[in-house]
Amino acid sequence: MGLVSKNVQRINSGWRYRRRIPETLQKVAGAREFTKALGSTEAIAAKNYAKVDAGYQANRFSFELVRKYPSLSFDHKVLLLPSSYQKSLHFFRVSSVRARR
C-alpha cells in the first residue's frame, strides 16, 4: 500500500513530514508549519514517521504551556521549550538586552 498520511509528502529528495502549527501557537513557535525530512526511501520514511510525529506533539505541548502561562519569566519559558528553540531564544534575549543599552 505504501506510506499514507496527510502529513507526509513526496519530494524530489525523498519524503518529508509537514504539519501546520495552529494559529494560536504560531507566535510562540515562530513558524507557521513544522517540517522535517523523513528519509530518501519509503521504507526509511515509514520507520522515522513515529519518532518525528512524537517530536511534533512534544513541541506543540511545550508551546501550549508557554502560551497558557504568560506570567512565567523568560527563563522559565525557555526551559519549557525544546532545546532547538532555547538556543535561538537565548541569542534573541542577549541581542535585545544589548540593543537597550
Image (spheres, rainbow, N blue to C red):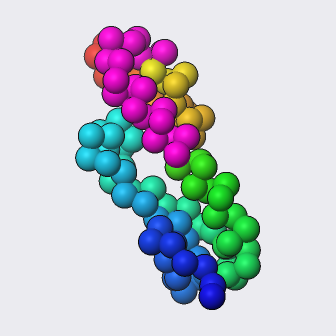
Q: Please name the predominant secondary structure of the magenta segment in the image.
A: helix
Magenta residues, start to end? 57-76
Front-most of residues 77 and 43: 43
Query: How far across and down, in percent of the image, does residue 89 sit?
Result: 46, 31
Query: How far across and down, in percent of the image, does residue 98 sit?
Result: 37, 19
Q: Left of 90 or right of it: where is 67?
A: left
Q: Is residue 51 above or below residue 4?
A: above
Query: Taking the image as drawn, is residue 90 in sight?
Result: no
Q: Is residue 61 above or below residue 66?
A: below
Check the image and name the residue furthest to the front.
Answer: 1
- Quadrant for residue 77, please give it: top left
Q: Left of 14 or right of it: where is 70?
A: left
Asked if the stretch drawn in magenta spans residue 71, the answer is yes
Tell me what residue is drawn at x 40 percent, y 26 percent: 66
Front-most of residues 86 and 29: 29
Query: Taking the image as drawn, is residue 30 in sight?
Result: yes
Front-most of residues 70 and 87: 70
Q: Is residue 88 above or below residue 1?
A: above
- In which quadrant will I find the C terminus? top left
Query: How far across and down, in percent of the image, does residue 85 sit?
Result: 51, 37
Q: Left of 42 or right of it: where is 32?
A: left
Query: How far across and down, in percent of the image, does residue 42 sit?
Result: 67, 81
Tell me what residue is drawn at x 33 percent, y 11 percent: 71
